[in-house]
Amino acid sequence: MRRSCLYVLLTISIVLVTRPDTARAQRVDAYLSEDSVYVGDRFTLTLIAMHGFAEAPSFPSTDSAFGDIIPVDLISAGTRFMDTDVRLDSAVYEVTTFALDTARLAPLVIGFGGNSVTATTAVQELPVSSIVPQDAEGIRDMAPPVEFGRPLLPYVLLGLAALIVAALIWYMIWRRQQSDPPPVTDFIGEDLPSPAETALRRLRALENTPLAERVQVETFYVELSDILRTYIEDRLFIPALESTTTELVRDLVHPNVQHQIPAGIPEQLEQILSLADLVKFADVTPSIPEGRSALEEAVTVIQRVEIKFDQRAASETFAKAGE
């Protein structure tokens, strides 16, 4: 019904308006799409400006105050030229209201000609219907509380947690009561290679790997990443194989680990492993020189870490001898 009235008013205003003076705005109007609404309903507000300026009018933004009418979104905006000197601009907003009984649409200011000239819409009131039934006699008393049975699940979970804690405590006590395990030297056979020896042997095997094809490049970087992660896990006892590159670097800069490795090692590892991640997950194909350089960097990382460990071992041996 409101929409039909809007079209009629627009037609009448176009017919009645004489040739406008281009120095000021001729007319601004605001139209609501509904005669009455319920609290929280969505409806539309249309602002119309008929003027003689060449510039488009400045309609209020959705952050502006519309009184009791709350703008939700700007649905559309358009322009229509009536003749060479008259243009009709409009803006349609989706709005709502949470007012009781009556919602007041405040005067809205529309600017023209760079906002040097403004015009204001008229105040409007929109009836707002209550969602309370008309035959309601009044506010009812509060209903009595509903009795619910006590849930058993929290108690079951609490009991299981207590059993788990008790089992862990018993296991720790049992482990302490056991005799010390036999030393490694009691095993028959040759000593196992150190983590560095194993890693360097695997890196030497990669030196002759061809990098001409995509499959060869991907295999090379997967193996390179696995060698470095396995070495770090065996040497520093960090779960490097299960960690992402970011998580691994974060563990390496932790105070409990950082003092065990030379400065700059986390950054070197991050550069190599990040390149390997790009090859595996982003289909990046580095050049052959980049692959050889990454291999040399991996060897340097292992050698620097081993030098640090040898220095620490020598220092500890010297301290024990002094005691």
Image (spheres, rainbow, N blue to C red):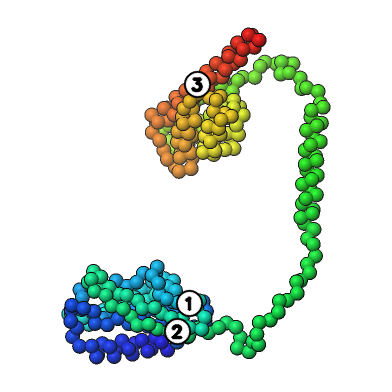
Q: Position of residue 296 (x, y in %)?
A: 44, 24
Eye-nearest disc, 2 or 3: 2
What amino acid does circle 3 point to? Arg
Specify which label sits upstream in the sequence, 1 or 3: 1
Q: Is residue 68 above or below residue 153?
A: below
What amino acid does circle 1 point to? Thr
Residue displayed at 44% across by 42% down: 283
Look at the numbered discs 2 and 1 and tell me whether their residues touch, using CB distance below 8 Å.
yes
Q: Which corner quadrant holds the C terminus?
A: top right
Q: Is residue 207 above or below residue 101?
A: above
SS for dot 1: strand
Residue displayed at 40% across by 75% down: 66
Residue at mark 2: 126
* Residue 71: quadrant of the picture: bottom left
SS for dot 3: helix
What amino acid does circle 2 point to? Leu
- Checking the image for residue 97, the label placed there is 1
Residue displayed at 61% across by 12% down: 319
Eye-nearest disc, 1 or 3: 1
Residue at mark 3: 304
Specify which label sits upstream in the sequence, 2 or 1: 1
